[in-house]
Amino acid sequence: KQEVTQIPAALSVPEGENLVLNCSFTDSAIYNLQWFRQDPGKGLTSLLLIQSSQREQTSGRLNASLDKSSGRSTLYIAASQPGDSATYLCAVNGGSQGNLIFGKGTKLSVKP
Amino acid sequence: NAGVTQTPKFRILKIGQSMTLQCTQDMNHNYMYWYRQDPGMGLKLIYYSVGAGITDKGEVPNGYNVSRSTTEDFPLRLELAAPSQTSVYFCGTGRTQETQYFGPGTRLLVL
């Protein structure tokens, strides 16, 4: 059974810092991996999707990497801003049905 | 183009009551999903559908039912509400199994 773990559970950093969020999964047979952002009381916004054949994806200040063989992904946020404060969820897509297996998330707080 | 809409946004139910959570998408996606998110947890799959007339159970289906009579709609039915069903419910859709778009969620409180 696929399990997804995210470390740390919470992170507080001063504005301007570069930071890394970690995601690990137990079954390397994945179709793709997605990073989502969730604001309090809101839905999920997809940030980056990495196909199983890819090593990384970039969007603006965000860079996500994938090492399928070791079951790990990282989300790198450069020059963090207070507006980046949110919960970041990692999810793996492992089946033909497309359902996602989610980690519990990392709650990020960026202090001005 | 509204994307994925969910109604209601918030509901309080008494134990034993029933209700239907609505999910509608206007993107002509075949894949639709229902997840629940408990406080401090990730989302868990309740039911999914790969097309009209086809549904299947996810990880936590007990206490729920679904139907998919059209491509656009994927309602989630709670027959006998229990406090354990207090959660936030998210509907997701996808054209293929590659990625998903999520609705804003329905917050349900069972007392």
Image (tube, rainbow, N blue to C red):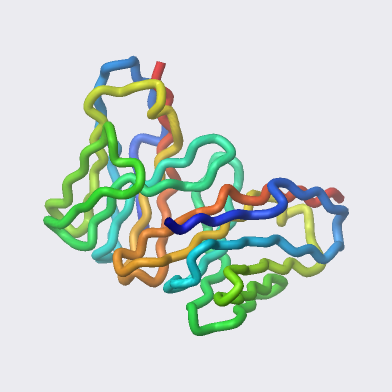
A22 relative to B48, above or below: below
Is B88 in front, or is B61?
B61
Is B67 left, or right, of B48 in this rendering?
Answer: left
Picture residue at 17% right of the left edge, 46% below the top: B67
Toward the viewer: B44 or B76? Answer: B44
Q: Residue B80 sits in which quadrant?
A: top left
Left-right relation of A110 to A37? right
Tell me the quarter of the picture where residue B12 sits: top left
Which quadrant, please, contains the C terminus of chain B? top left
Q: Is residue A104 visible?
A: yes
Q: Position of residue A13 (x, y in %)?
A: 84, 53
Percent coordinates x, y for residue A39 in the rendering: 60, 47
The total of numbered circles placed on residues is 0
- Residue A1 position, x and y percent, is 42, 56
Residue occupying the point 69% across, 47% down: A9
Q: Position of residue B55 (x, y in %)?
A: 19, 53
Q: Is residue B1 visible?
A: no
- Identify the image quadrant of the N terminus of chain B: bottom left
**Residue at (59% x, 54% y) in the render:** A5
Residue depicted at 26% across the width and 19% down the height:
B17
